[in-house]
Amino acid sequence: MDFKDILKSTEFGIFIAFLALCIILSFANPNFLSYYNISTVMKQVSFIAIMSVGMTMVILTAGIDLSVGAVLGLVNVLAALFINKFGLAPGISTALLCGTFLGFLNGIIIVKWDLPPFIVTLGMMNIARGLALVITKGWPVTGLPECFGCLAEGRLIGIPVPVIIMAIIYILGYLFLSRTIWGRYIYASGGNEKATWLSGVNVNKIKVLVYTITGFLSGLAGIMLASRLSQGSPITGTGYELSVIGAVVIGGTDLMGGKGSVLGSLIGASIMGVLANGLVLLGVSAFWQQVILGLVIIIAVAGGSMRRKLSMKGEK
Amino acid sequence: MKKKTTDKYILEMENVSKTFPGVKALNKVNFNLKAGEVHALVGENGAGKSTLLKILAGAYKKDTGVIKLDGSKVEMTDPKHALDLGISVIYQEFNLIPNLSIAENIFIGRAPRKQKAFVDFPELYNKSEFFLKKIGMKRDPKTLVGRLSVAEQQMVEIAKSLSFFSKIIIMDEPTSALNGSEKKTLFRIIRELKNKGVSIIFISHIIEEVLEISDRVTVLRDGNYVGTLNATDTNPREIVQMMVGRELKDFYPKIEVKRGEVVLEVKNLTKKSKYEDISFQLHAGEVLGFAGLVGCGRVQVMRGIFGIETPDRGEVLIKGKKVKTKTLLETIKMKMGFVPEDRREEGLILSRSVKDNINITKLPEINSHGFVKQKEEENIANDYCKRLNIRTPNNKQIVQNLSGGNQQKIVIAKWLAINPKILILDDPTRGIDVGAKNEIYSLINNLAKEKMGIILISSELPEILNISDRILIMREGKITGELKRKEATQEKIMRLAALRN
């Protein structure tokens, strides 16, 4: 990829928008650029951003996963319960496994019964959220060991641990999508599922894989949130699915599948995080924040579709 | 038949030019049309036929030049305007809504009303019936369009054009989806329209049929006007030469290859109500043609062998080894490739690059622990672009932007990449220009020379006759005959393909 390609890429356009936003906010409120504020924003962004890696892959195959917030909630509760019962390491890994399994289940049901991902994951969203409430009877799970808090509150060379985890997930996600054969297959099956299958690719396996990865990452975010709040709460992550999908879409990934990148989703998640933070700093009420975030999602998608139309005209 | 043709021009286009960013799509093109004339427009892909068509249809605006209708200058502003001026277009992809009736489709958006709000159905059906009768279509106008065959849908499109009282009907590749008898019906309708004074612009790739139906032929090449000929004074060879700008020495090259061992054996392959007891052998270095009318089951047989739609009974053996699961995941591993008829839907990932498309079958081989060997990927793409003469600025180009011929070569390239022993080609030259066709024929020859076994299905009989070593003919799901290259003629094939006993 040479310099010209980078300038023309969707990600670059979004990045410029992100930079502009940061510059405006730093003028509007000098506190925006403080170390404390930046690290808080990044930490907040990290939970959504981690799930966005999985969601990007799902959307690249022209699917959708509405269950990420609920899976996060269930794993959040399970992690707290298991850690209290079995100890730190076994607790965390069992909870992670549960999240991964729920994702796997999404994938298997979608391919085996040939059902629309929207419906299957909508069902899973209700099941997971319901189970979290059933298990806890609606009460938060407390009494977690203090050292568990380090996962979310600790710092390494001044960087919050969740941000480091996020960086690792993004590097792995980026390599996976751009360098491995599975990444190639994900883009291919989103671009044209039938042609990909007719080329001898087991498209069903690829689909199960992306939902499983998403389940795993939702679980990971759930555990990190349990550490952050030092409790497991059955309502954690309510509505996160929309933030995650919003981040991916702002990042330029095409809901029709086949086009997009995790890099875009990272910028998308950052725009949403910075915007929310900036609005707080500017003293905008929480209710208005929602309205503005909604507008940003629509404008971002409209911008993307205009770019596409323009570039198609140019090619004709 | 030609007596209705007058010498008065109903349409004249003079020095019409159109430029798109970076491309001169039309360069001072002249075209005229007499009342009651069938005037064919031919040229390779990218010659400017579609641009010309879209300017007439009001979809594009010309940059310079003059368009005259009945001698007076006009400027088409939009498609509606062109329609009002009496010009209608029947595109290759029909503009019909399958879950509406024939009548509703003909009068879509302008159905007769009662009290302004309600559709006057009796009137709607009466009017539709009138236009259907005009072209001799005996269908109830209440029938849903989705229930009609492609040929009948096309007739609905023609009836729709007539309902606008169009004086000029443009048909873009109207025969591409029709079988032999449907084509005859279409030509009959065209002749009747002509006798009623309707003028037709006929766009087609198939030179023989152009000469059969049209009075005059205009050739375009690279956006330039090459010339206009009377159909009776010319021959296919001359037209092809004008289209490509050079003489194609041998349009159907054929090298005799000594055939080798059996690479594919099919035994009693059966799929209920599709095909029955299909048995044959394919040898290395052999091109085996499959002929038959549309719907004879040859395409289904190939899809069954490759493992797209699993057959009910029977065996497929590749180099003597049985295909156990009868799915394509297994046949591909056993080195079989399949170039599908519909390259846009089934052959290509249009939104991905040339490189990605060529390598999709090859990825299992060119990775280490799942990581793609990017250098090899690059080399394979460049290698096949060169070998198959795929014209693309570079291998990162999105496939969508390439011409049909180059797209088809990419589909073939992705199969060649796995070094197949057997390659099934389902209508590989469909909708691609003459030059690229010729290149694909040469390629088939070379592959046979390299001891590949090739099965060829084609909608064009001359293609099968000239390229195959041996031809199997199918009718109603059964093989009805086998002809050697030397003994095969169109008549013999048609007799086996169309007649019962």
Image (cartoon, rainbow, N blue to C red):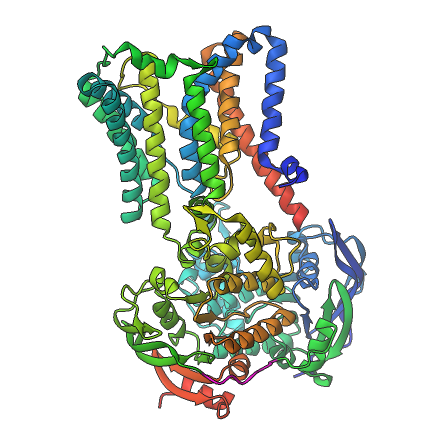
- Is residue B34 within the magenta segment? no
Determine the main secondary structure of the stretch shown in magenta. loop
Residue B396 position, x and y percent, is: 60, 49
Residue A179 position, x and y percent, is: 49, 42
**Up/down of A130 relative to B31, above or below:** above
* Front residue of B229 and A242: A242
**Up/down of A228 relative to A51, above or below:** above
* Front residue of B31 and B127: B31
* Front residue of B240 and B97: B240
Residue B328 position, x and y percent, is: 36, 62
Q: Residue furthest bottom?
A: B487
* Front residue of B158 and B95: B95
- Write the start and end of the magenta stretch as one range: B252-259
Q: Which residue is at a point 52% across and 65% down the rendered structure image?
A: B412
Q: Is residue B111 visible?
A: no
- Is residue B253 within the magenta segment? yes
